[in-house]
Structure formats: C-alpha cells, structure tokens
C-alpha cells in the first residue's frame, strides 16, 4: 500500500488512516480471540482435572462402602447363626438334608 505524504511527512489520505486503524483493530481482535481461546482451554482443562479427581474420590469412597457392607453382612450372618432359633432349626433340618443328599446320589 503506498501512502502519499505532505511536506511534514504526515499521511494525507483519510482512506489510508482508516485502513491503518482497521488493520490495527483486526490485529487486536485476533489477539483477543487467541487469548480468549487459551483461557477457555485452560478453564476446560481445570474442569476435566476436577472431574477426574472427583471420580477418583468417589471410586475410593465406593470401595470403602463395599468393604464396610461386606463386613456388616458377615457380622449379621454370624449373629443370626448364634441365635437359639437358628441352632434349633439347623438341628431339626440336619436329618432332612442328609436324606436329600442320599436321594441325590441315587
């Protein structure tokens, strides 16, 4: 782009000034878009990392709950098997189980 200058070295064309201002604004807009894209990418990355950390935490919590449930079930089963009702029922059914086993073998 050629510019016409007057005796003082100033640009004498209004169109050239508009083009220069437009180019400067387009450059600034491009830089702002890049900065915005970088900021959005950084925010998305933080969000993904926070989600990953939350999943790891929930996974650990789920493992702890499963272990506690297993222990509670074992303890409840042992407590039930110690009750007098359970013991009497087991003694009454023992001969019946023996007969069933013998019948299955034949």
Image (tube, helix red, strand yellow):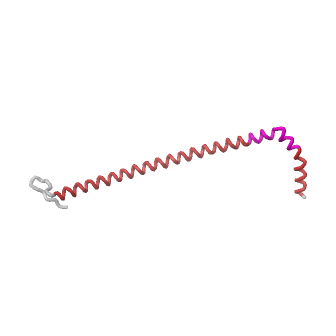
**Residue 85 covered by magenta stretch:** yes
Q: Residue furthest toward the bottom?
A: 1
**Residue 99 covered by magenta stretch:** no
| Number of marks | 0
Q: Quadrant of the C terminus?
A: bottom right
Question: Horizontal and vertical percent for residue 44?
Answer: 45, 50
Point out the stretch of residues depicted in magenta: 74-91
Relative placement, left or right, of 73 versus 102 is left
Question: Horizontal and vertical percent for residue 42?
Answer: 42, 49
Query: Residue at the location (53% across, 48% down)?
Result: 52
Relative placement, left or right, of 62 versus 24 is right
Q: Quadrant of the N terminus?
A: bottom left
Query: Residue at the location (15% across, 55% down)?
Result: 11
Query: Residue at the location (37% across, 51% down)?
Result: 36
Question: Horizontal and vertical percent for residue 103?
Answer: 90, 56
Q: Residue furthest toward the left?
A: 7
Question: Horizontal and vertical percent for residue 28?
Answer: 29, 52
Relative placement, left or right, of 2 versus 53 is left
Q: Main secondary structure of the magenta part?
A: helix
Relative placement, left or right, of 66 versus 54 is right
Query: Residue at the location (32% across, 54% down)?
Result: 30
């Amino acid at each position: 782009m050629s510019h016409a200058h007057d005796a003082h070295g100033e640009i004498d064309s209004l169109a050239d000034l508009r083009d220069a201002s437009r180019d400067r604004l387009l450059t600034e807009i491009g830089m702002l878009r890049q900065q915005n894209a970088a900021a959005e990418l950084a925010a998305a990355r933080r969000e993904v990392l926070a989600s990953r950390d939350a999943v790891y935490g929930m996974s650990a919590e789920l493992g702890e709950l499963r272990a506690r449930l297993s222990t509670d079930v074992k303890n409840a089963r042992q407590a039930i098997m110690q009750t007098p009702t359970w013991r009497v029922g087991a003694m009454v059914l023992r001969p019946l189980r023996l007969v069933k086993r013998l019948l299955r073998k034949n």
